[in-house]
């Protein structure tokens, strides 16, 4: 059985381990590379979890981290869904749905009326997951990728207030 855990700064080793596992398993799905996450030590991981208003969730299966998602405050009050990943062993069992739903529940409580995300073009499974949750592509240009030509795909979902 999978359970979700909202992580705090004291959970930094758990967040570090799952955040490193994601680009190691699916480097094609993340803009940052695994090597980017080996610098900084404990202070870097705690700083990520200490961002005011942020919401980080880890999915656990039999005590092992098998997924993650984060909600971060964004520019102009539009929070962002970030760092969504589900391990191969947990895919197809609704873990991604639960992680996204956890961040979608947090966002209106933080005063948001919409949730934004950026996904790498060609990551069709992730795009399909986001579309199932009501995210739609925008015309907003996403960040420029390392090739100097391609940009992230920006998607947004309107949220209902609780």
Image (cartoon, rainbow, N blue to C red):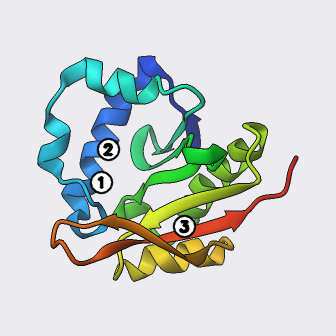
Question: How far apart in space, not on screen, are marks 1 and 3 (Cα)?
Answer: 18 Å
The picture places residue 16, in percent across and down from the top left corner, at 30, 34
Q: Could you tell me if the residues under marks 1 and 2 are in contact, i.e. CB atoms within 8 Å? A: yes
Q: Is 22 left or right of 117, judged from the image as shown?
A: left
Q: Is residue 28 visible?
A: yes
Crowd tier of the residue under label 1, counting other residues whose Cα lies within 10 Å: few below 14, some 14–19, many 20 or above: many
Q: Residue at x 42, y 59 (%)?
A: 86
Rendered image: mark on residue 131: none
Question: What is the total number of numbered labels drawn onto the structure image?
Answer: 3
**Where is mark 2, residue-wise?**
19
Q: Could you tell me if the residues under marks 1 and 3 are in contact, i.e. CB atoms within 8 Å? A: no
Q: Quadrant of residue 155?
A: bottom right
Q: Could you tell me if the residues under marks 2 and 3 are in contact, i.e. CB atoms within 8 Å? A: no
The picture places residue 22, in percent across and down from the top left corner, at 30, 54
Residue, far right: 162
Q: Earlier in the sequence, mark 2 or mark 3?
A: 2
The picture places residue 162, in percent across and down from the top left corner, at 88, 46
The picture places residue 32, in percent across and down from the top left corner, at 23, 54
Q: Nearer the viewer, residue 74 or 12?
A: 74
Crowd tier of the residue under label 2, counting other residues whose Cα lies within 10 Å: few below 14, some 14–19, many 20 or above: many
Look at the picture and state if 63 lies above or below 76. above
Look at the picture and state if 91 lies above or below 161. below
Q: Residue at x 37, y 23 (%)?
A: 47
Q: Residue at x 31, y 67 (%)?
A: 29
Rendered image: mark on residue 22: 1
**Where is mark 3, residue-wise?**
93
In front: mark 2 or mark 3? 2
Look at the picture and state if 121 lies above or below 40. below
Q: Quadrant of residue 36?
A: top left
């Amino acid at each position: 059985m999978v359970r979700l855990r909202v992580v705090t700064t004291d959970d930094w080793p758990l967040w570090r381990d799952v955040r490193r596992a994601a680009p190691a398993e699916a480097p094609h799905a993340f803009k940052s590379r695994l090597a980017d996450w080996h610098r900084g030590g404990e202070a870097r991981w705690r700083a990520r979890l200490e961002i005011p208003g942020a919401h980080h969730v880890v999915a656990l299966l039999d005590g092992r981290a098998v997924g993650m998602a984060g909600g971060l405050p964004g520019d102009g009050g539009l929070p962002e869904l970030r760092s969504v990943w589900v391990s191969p062993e947990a895919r197809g069992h609704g873990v991604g749905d639960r992680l996204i739903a956890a961040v979608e529940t947090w966002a209106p409580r933080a005063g948001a009326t919409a949730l934004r995300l950026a996904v790498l073009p060609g990551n069709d499974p992730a795009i399909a997951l986001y579309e199932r949750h009501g995210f739609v592509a925008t015309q907003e240009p996403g960040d420029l990728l390392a090739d100097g030509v391609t940009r992230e795909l920006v998607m947004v979902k309107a949220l209902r207030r609780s």
